[in-house]
Amino acid sequence: MSGETIGFIGIGRMGLPMASRLVAAGYRLVAYDVQGQALSAITAKGAEKASSPADVASRAEIVLASLPMPDIVREVALGENGVGAGTRAKLFVDLSTTGPRMAKTVAAGLKERNITAIDAPVSGGIAGATKGTLALMVAGPAAECERLKPVLQNLGKYFYIGAEPGMGQMMKVINNLLSATATAATSEAIVLGVKAGLDPYLMIDVINSGSGRSAASEDKFPKSILPRSFDFGFALGLLSKDVNLCIAEAEALGVPMWIGNAVKQMWLYGLAQGGPDQDFTNLITHIEKWAGVTVGGKRR
Ligand code: NAD
């Protein structure tokens, strides 16, 4: 409902465009981020500044969060000055990718404070967040999720995954394992083609007209890898975190994942080479070293 107050914690690469859409939709937004600059970016658009997650949760019944790592989500939800210490919040909605286990921990901790936790991780990147075309994977009690639907539909397509906390997170880490697999495999394949003397632009054109295509070949290569801008907008450390979360679930459930484990090692290698803050599209630069070639640059 427009005019309602919504809390928003974590105004980063994804948080800023999502929060901006809610302001534009007419919600009164109360925002918090540890970085003053991130917070200013949303207050400039009309949001009100809060001083802590607890402050946000004392001013809004619905609190959304888009935070980088699982431990940060735990602290923001359950820590001393966390959402659980607020006086008004009824729903805590985690849009971050934090894995099923953290979703369950947060849900159990907040339940003691009469706050329902909903996991609603998103897919579609900054472009999807800006255009409102994300896929939202929503899990939690049906009535509360239904109440959130009109809010979340401002951000993209609403998928109700199930009633158990963490089911949305499970869906999300499976999606990201596939996305990470396509990016790693396409990077390796294009490096091979370049070593063999093929034109990488032509290769991507052919692949996108053929059966080897994926979101990596259709989106990541043309936008950020072939032009070597490496600016897709998702940190390598965060994608590696997502793959690790997925493999940890597979291990806990006793499901073997040969390909998944190879993909996990590829991203750990990228992490060791380039650090967590690099854009994830840089993975190919670390693969190029094996073959002694450079992919892309100016189109021939
Ligand atoms: P980001 O690092 O750009 O943003 C995270 C924000 O959280 C930053 O502004 C940071 O200052 C803030 N923050 C950190 N600790 C905090 C705390 N204790 N309290 C309040 N704010 C805090 O990350 P991002 O790329 O926006 O990703 C956010 C989440 O969304 C991650 O879980 C990521 O895996 C997921 N995600 C990202 C993308 C993408 O394309 N970038 C796509 C889908 C999902």
Image (cartoon, rainbow, N blue to C red):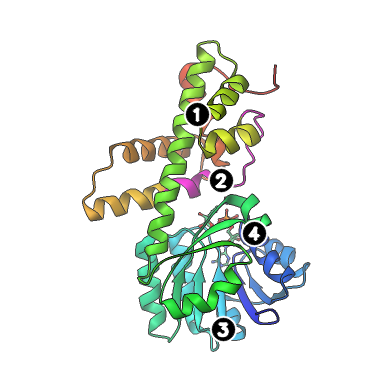
Regarding mark 3 in the picture, which secondary structure is present there? loop
Q: Residues within 10 Å of mark 4 (few under 14, many from 20)?
A: some
- Image coordinates of residue 119 in percent, x first then y, are 45, 67
Nearest the eye: 239 or 212? 212
- Inspect the image, locate mark 1, and give the three-letter code of the amino acid beneath it: Ser
Q: Earlier in the sequence, mark 2 or mark 1?
A: 1
- Inspect the image, locate mark 4, and give the three-letter code of the amino acid beneath it: Gly
Quadrant for the N terminus in the image: bottom right
Q: Which residue matches tag 1?
A: 187
Q: Quick check: is 236 in the magenta stretch? A: yes
Q: Which residue matches tag 4?
A: 132
Q: Which residue matches tag 2?
A: 277
- Inspect the image, locate mark 2, and give the three-letter code of the amino acid beneath it: Asp
Q: Earlier in the sequence, mark 1 or mark 3?
A: 3
Q: Is residue 121 above or below residue 164?
A: above
Q: Which residue matches tag 3?
A: 61
